[in-house]
Amino acid sequence: MLYPSLFDSFFAPTRVIVVSEERLQAAEREARQQQLEALDSRIDELTKYRTSLYNQLKPSNEKAGKDLDQLDGVDCDV
């Protein structure tokens, strides 16, 4: 028989894999740990990006005023 029939595919033996409860829990724990590490990495990336955007949006005169205050030792925001 060159081509298997559609009927034969319904009665093909299924594959069953037996795994111990401990190995299953270890695999689930490892998957959760990898997800947590990926999330932490993404949070770090987003935090750095947010900080850089925030620094770009600061008015330039605010930075200049702070620099002058440090030079003359007087805190004057007028």
Image: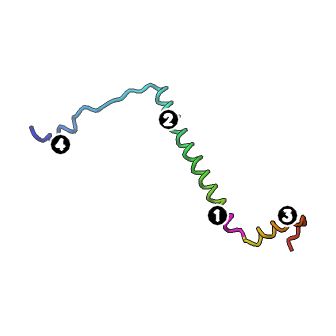
Residue in front for this viewpoint, 70 or 23: 70
- Check the image and name the residue furthest to the front: 71
The amino acid type, in three-letter code, at marker 3 is Gln
Q: Position of residue 35 (x, y in %)?
A: 53, 43
Gap in angstroms between the C-alphas marked 4 and 2: 37 Å
The residue depicted at 88 percent of the width and 70 percent of the height is: 76
The amino acid type, in three-letter code, at marker 1 is Leu
Q: Secondary structure at mark 1?
A: helix
Quarter of the image for residue 17 reads: top left
Q: Which residue is mark 2?
A: 28
Q: Secondary structure at mark 3?
A: helix
Q: Which residue is mark 3?
A: 70
Q: Earlier in the sequence, mark 1 or mark 3?
A: 1
Q: Badge 1: how crowded within 10 Å, few (<14), some, or many (20+)?
A: few
Answer yes or no: do the residues labelled 1 and 3 have beta carbons within 8 Å?
no
Q: Tell me the tag on residue 53.
A: 1
Q: Badge 4: how crowded within 10 Å, few (<14), some, or many (20+)?
A: few
Q: Which residues are magenta?
A: 54-58
The residue depicted at 22 percent of the width and 34 percent of the height is: 12
Gap in angstroms between the C-alphas marked 1 and 4: 60 Å
Query: Which callout, 3 or 4, points to the residue nearer the camera?
Result: 3
Residue in front for this viewpoint, 35 or 22: 35
